[in-house]
Amino acid sequence: MKIFQRKYESGLLLIMCVVSRLPQLFSQHRVMDGDECIVGLMAKHLYDGIEFPLYFYGQSYGFTAVETLVIALFYFFLGITALSVKLAMLSQWTSGVYFFYKTVKQITEPSSFTPLFISIVFILAPAWAIWSMMARGGYLTAFMLSNVCIFLLLRKQDAHKQLRFFIPGVLCVLIYESHALWFPALLPIVFYALWKQRNIKAVLVFALALVSTAGVFYGIKIRLGSFWPRPVTYFTGDVPGVLRELPLRMYHNMTGSYYYKNIIDLGPINNALALFFVIALFIALLVALYLWIRRRGTALLYMSALAVVFILLTTLYIPDYAPRYLLPLSGAAMFLFSLLMERISFRWLYGALYLSFILPGAWAFYNFKNYRCEIHNEKNLVSLSNALLREKIHYVFCKSPLLQWQIDFYSKEKVIARYSSLTDRYPSYINEVNKAFQTGKQTAIVDFYYAEPFDQAKKVLVENIYLVEKVKSKEQLNKNGFNISK
């Protein structure tokens, strides 16, 4: 068994990361939403040599360079497809799980089953079912780099124990720039690692890396415009209200089945697993508190519990809350679980816990093939693009703000779309569509079909989902809410 652990555990986890996501990858409902398509387009522009975007288009936050680089690499081998984007993001998430496993492995006994068990639980936990393949401006970069950072911080001492704090200092800034929600969970672990060193040189090296990297990003961002401002965060003051809602917020996040703020019910097994994780996490926090009061725990255990608390407290500063804002919670919870599991002396309990979770977890992931967040899928979007191209329409005015990006991506920019606003995340598209209309090229207005009566002489129904209307005049555009001049 020791040979198996030493040689095959990492490979097993890699296989599980991929196999568990296959039902989603081959689901008839698979589709990249508008924001995912923006990242896919950013990677295409990098792949085509047009530009190297550092942040999510239209923002000076959401560091996305790592994601676009990885996607561009997958484009090279698999072509510019949605599958390339999904697999690229899955590779980032899998890398994060690998470093999570390696971190737990180095803080537990060499013969312990905890690293393998807790990593399998992490893989099959519904919280990351959808988001493990979601290209969405920094989330997966923050997840991956935070696991790398914690691995380096908790690594056993070596000959360069001061220098090894330089890379975590850099990573902390990259994580903050990718998605600040992961930063609060890092603070207790950083404090623990530096405190454990009791070496002022290590602190100075970490601070130097942190400040210098932050300075570089400040210099970059000061030159960037920002169409989409950073979400406003402030202390809501409604502590009782947030605390009442906290268990439900945790539950919705742990289901992994939501789209923006909309909860998508995937059945009792998925819901039961989410409820199990919420209850288990509250129990884990109570046990950690008991051990702290009795002085029977370790400093790392206390800090891992504090990391969970910090993540939960961030909800007090997010007035426009959505379930994805608790994505850092599951990783911090798994780390806390691993430290508590090491204190269990009854090894048979591992088997009991594993068997009670593995089958429901596997079924829940198979059932994610039924996850549907939009009324259309990839086949519909490709059909729409082909229908436009058959009519030699390469430029469209789109009445849906997210559909415009899906048309751009799924047509591989053979059809360029713009929304009704005069400014947007990628102004070049607006200029191109406007210029096409002004120079007499054929353009069209595209919208979803809402089952309302329409003039069949003027509009064409595509896939029973989209309405396409060729543009004949500027007045027609104005009537539909489009203005082509600033």
Image (cartoon, rainbow, N blue to C red):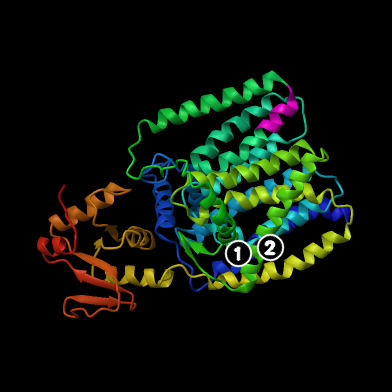
Q: Which residues are magenta?
A: 191-198
Q: Is residue 310 visible?
A: yes
Main SS, magenta residues: helix
Residue receiving disc 1 = 21
Question: Which residue lies under the disc numbered 2?
Answer: 276
Image spot of residue 225 (x, y percent): 32, 37
Residue drawn at x 59%, y 63% as measured from the top left: 255
In percent of the image, x 45 and y 43: which residue is there?
62
- Give the position of the N terminus as an image quadrant: bottom right
Q: Which mark is residue 193?
A: none
291 and 146: which is toward the camera: 291
Q: Quadrant of residue 359?
A: bottom right
Q: Is residue 289 left or right of residue 394?
A: right
Q: Earlier in the sequence, mark 2 or mark 1?
A: 1
Percent x, y of residue 460? 24, 76
Residue 242 in picture, x, y percent from top left: 53, 51
The kind of residue tagged 2 is Phe
